[in-house]
Image: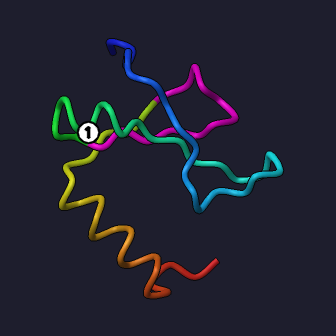
Amino acid sequence: MTPLIHPWVKSSYSSQDGGNCLEWSPVHVCAHGAVPVRDSKTPDGPALIFEPAAWSSFVAGVQAGGFPA
């Protein structure tokens, strides 16, 4: 897989104390129309890339409580 060259940012919903952190690349979304996400604790690990509609549906499901812990 070709590494993403755009900068990553921590999600505003992630813990700021180094816990469960999700990063995404808004510049990549604007440039390529796809949403890359990764675990900030393993920045050299894999990234998942979603179509914007699929990512929006997932986020809405999480916000609605559809994925209880």
Q: Is residue 34 left or right of residue 58?
A: left
| Position above or below: 53 against 24 | below
Residue at x 64%, y 57% (from the top left corner): 14
**x and y percent of residue 20 in the render?**
70, 53
Q: Is residue 8 left or right of residue 60?
A: right
Residue at x 35%, y 76% (from the top left corner): 60
Quarter-of-image position of residue 13: bottom right
Is 23 covered by the magenta stretch? no
Residue with the most extreme right position = 17
| Position above or below: 23 against 43 | below
**x and y percent of residue 43 in the render?**
60, 26
Residue at x 33%, y 15% (from the top left corner): 1
Return the residue at label 1: 29
Q: Is residue 28 left or right of residue 64?
A: left
- Say what amino acid the circle numbered 1 marks: Val
| Position above or below: 62 against 38 | below
- Magenta-colored span: 35-46
